[in-house]
Image (spheres, helix red, strand yellow):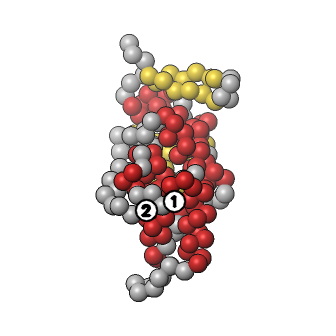
Amino acid sequence: MALVSQGVNIKSNLTLFDYLLLGRSSFHSIFDQPDERDKEVVFKIINQIGLQNYTNISLQSMSGGQRQLAIIGRALAQEPQILIMDEPTSALDYRNQTVVLKLIKMLSDQGISIIMSTHDPNQAQMIGDVVGLLIDNQTYHQGPVADILNDEYLTNLYGIPITSTYNESLNRKIFGIGMD
């Protein structure tokens, strides 16, 4: 199991490669050095997260979206079967949100169980199979995305009118807020 926390502020001059290599430390005793297998895993993850051109670049030189991918990559270096993610797209622009969501979907398709919190029902719908809603720390709804993400439950969750529209080109509902 690995955790991707929300809003991690990396204040290190480590390169991407070295930062991801730290994710392998649980496979070794305190005095062991990384081995070839560790390096192979890290290179594979760098390719998986799409940061091949940043392997030897300092994390401080990367954008927020690239650092978020690095944080996910470090968790992946632990080779988890379960990945817990606390709002992995918070504070990211649309492009980087899309990159992260596509990565999460790919990881799920590869058999990694993803437990992810988000405040955006559109994101949950794009990548989720089963969702849970906790309303006022009292009412809990869990089930298939199509059953749980609906206007009624989301209006109760957020306390404002939520309206969905089916978008044929995306082949899914889009949730929006009313500004009345």
Tell me the kind of residue under disc 1.
Thr
Q: Is residue 73 above or below residue 167?
A: below
Element carrying mark 2: loop
Tell me the kind of residue under disc 2.
Thr
Q: Residue at x 39, y 31 (%)?
A: 158
Q: Is residue 175 left or right of residue 139?
A: right
Q: Position of residue 43 (x, y in %)?
A: 58, 65
**Which residue is identified by label 2?**
15
Q: Is residue 90 left or right of residue 27?
A: left
Q: Position of residue 64 (x, y in %)?
A: 40, 45
**Which residue is identified by label 1?**
55
- Look at the image and tell me whether residue 160 can be seen: yes
* Residues at discs 2 and 1 in contact (Cβ within 8 Å): yes
**Camera-side residue: 45 or 79?**
45
Marks 2 and 1 sit apart, C-alpha to C-alpha, by: 7 Å
Q: Residue at x 33, y 61 (%)?
A: 12
- Look at the image and tell me whether residue 80 can be seen: no
Element carrying mark 1: loop
**Camera-side residue: 146 or 106?**
106
Q: Residue at x 40, y 84 (%)?
A: 30
Of the two numbered discs 2 and 1 on the same chain, state the one appearing first in sequence: 2
Q: Is residue 43 above or below residue 150?
A: below
